[in-house]
Amino acid sequence: MGVFDSITGGGSKKARQKLDEGQVLLESGQGKEALACFDEAVKLDAKCVDAHYARANLKLQYGKKEDAVKDFNEALRLDPGHAKAYGGRGLARVQMGRLADAVGDFNEALRLNPQSALLYYNLGSARFKQGQYQEALEAYGHGLRLNPGHAGMWYASGKSKAALGRKEEAIADFSEAIRIEPKNPKAFGRRGVLKMSLGNMKEAMADFDKAIAMEPRNAGAYFNRANVRSRMGMKEEAVLDYDEAIRLSPTNAVAYYNRGNGHFSLGKHAEAIKDYNKALKLDSTLALAYYSRSAARISTGERDKGIKDLEIFVQMSENSLAGTSKIREEAIRQLEALKTSNTVAVMPLPEDTEPMDAIKEVESFKGESKAGEGIKEQKFEAIIFIDICKSTNTIDGFGELHYFQKVLGVLDKPLAELKKRYNCMFEKSTGDGYMLTFNDCTNAANLAVCILQEVERHNTITDDPAFKVDLRIGMDCGQVIVKESDSDRIGDAANIAKRIEGLMADSFVELAEPAKISFPDKNRIFLSAKVLTMLGESHNIKNSEVGWAELKGKVGMRYQIHQIHWRESTPSASPGSTSVRL
């Protein structure tokens, strides 16, 4: 099917010939050659709407979102009634994270072409990404009335209903998607999760079996089938499924926690402790992992460590975290018994602690942040904070003009090049440094290594202390909320990265031996255990453990902190890495 279904003003004969030639090349899979033809068509006739539209679509396929938007803009300037150009620009804006603008484009396209099921599908998808599930469901409903045989729309409608808590209706929608498209592992997986939540374990198991058969690398299906098997008392089989889920998704902290509970129930307490350790390295907010580890430690004779874990759990669950209030009461009784008796108590795991479900529907932000500002989207990113050490002393000693022109100038030029090289997604000044975000942990680590190496080169050739620069860098990764107004990032990952950057020795409750001898208080890169796991098997980034720290504002939570040895690390010359993709 050709892209040109309307001829709108302008357009010389030679430009039209180039368009036709490019279309033939595109349909034969020669995209680059087609793009050259579309470029030539625009040169021959800058007023040819179809040339701009065709080029925009192809640029979007190649991931050139900003360039695509420019061509869509030009097509719409030349023809304000071009519905497909509005739709194409909407897709580009979704990919750019400009969800509110995308919704506006899809609505305008639908005003011009109200019979397009595809436009309703795209509108619903943008609404869903905004967390506006009811509005998304309404859009999908319109689309399905126009095209009731669209399996993807039934699946999307099911996701929206699940997010709204309408589980039975969501199951019906996923079933319809499966009827139309029987080989749909995502629909089987989603339906299985809902059936599991409703207690239909055998039916859920069957859905996960089918999802795995269709997509053997589906980590979520293995994880959820393990949860079902655990609930059905199939402990050994559950552990095997958790093994596979972890192999396919090594940063799933809850999978380690659940597998630890499986090992515990099988009497393999040492293996359970290893899993709880890994879970807490990846996510130290898993309060129940401290409780379970305390039970395992007490069972292996590590009484003092078990008591310490119980104390941490009681502290963390003080505000009655969801699902922990009854267990907290039991933990307090166990603590009292352990502290008043010399005998080693056997502490079983309460049934409530296993298994924990990690894969849930995305929660709505209801379009607002804490400050009442609009939310653009939610996404996963790696975040680094770069802080210039003793910036206040520098300003007091040499003046603000020196600081902003000279000290920041040392960083601005290399950072500008490095941000491009490693695909920085967002940046902002923090006054005495910078916050930068990336979609890949290795790119973030590479930039951090490069900037410290650059600063060291600068410092070695600078004798004047007023021009020397020392840095502290903190890294974390995870879910962030992107604000509509300025694209700023808020949420735990950003807060944790900032707090890791400022850690000093007195923040650590336990230091590794090298850090006890010489604690690195400047020119360092500190990162969370989650980032280290996400880096995967990259041998170019050398690192070691610093210790366990308590972060400001995170009462009772302990984070394992590592440092990158940036002098011994060799950053890659270009983006793209072996790290686990976010």
Image: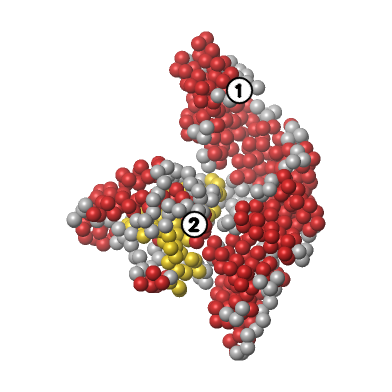
* Residue, disc 1: 27
Instruction: For label 2, count other residues whose C-alpha is less than 10 Å away and answer few (under 14), some (14-19) or many (20+).
Output: many
Going 72% across and 56% down the picture, which residue do you hit? 225
* Residue, disc 2: 531
Q: Quadrant of residue 303?
A: bottom right
CA distance for labels 2 and 1: 42 Å
Going 63% across and 36% down the picture, which residue do you hit? 122
Please, what is the three-letter code of the amino acid marked with disc 1? Glu
Q: Quadrant of residue 352?
A: bottom right
Observer-nearest of 305 and 285: 305
Going 39% across and 69% down the picture, which residue do you hit? 514
Q: Position of residue 183 (x, y in %)?
A: 74, 41
253, above or below 78, in the image: below
Observer-nearest of 63 and 235: 235
Q: Position of residue 51 (x, y in %)?
A: 52, 20
Q: Quadrant of the N terminus?
A: top right
43, above or below 481, in the image: above
Please indicate, yes or no, whether residue 360 appears anywhere in the rendered image. Answer: no
Badge 1 element: helix
* Residue extending furthest toward the left: 463
Scheme of colours in the image: secondary structure
Please, what is the three-letter code of the amino acid marked with disc 2? Val
Observer-nearest of 402 and 271: 271
* Residue extending furthest toward the top: 13
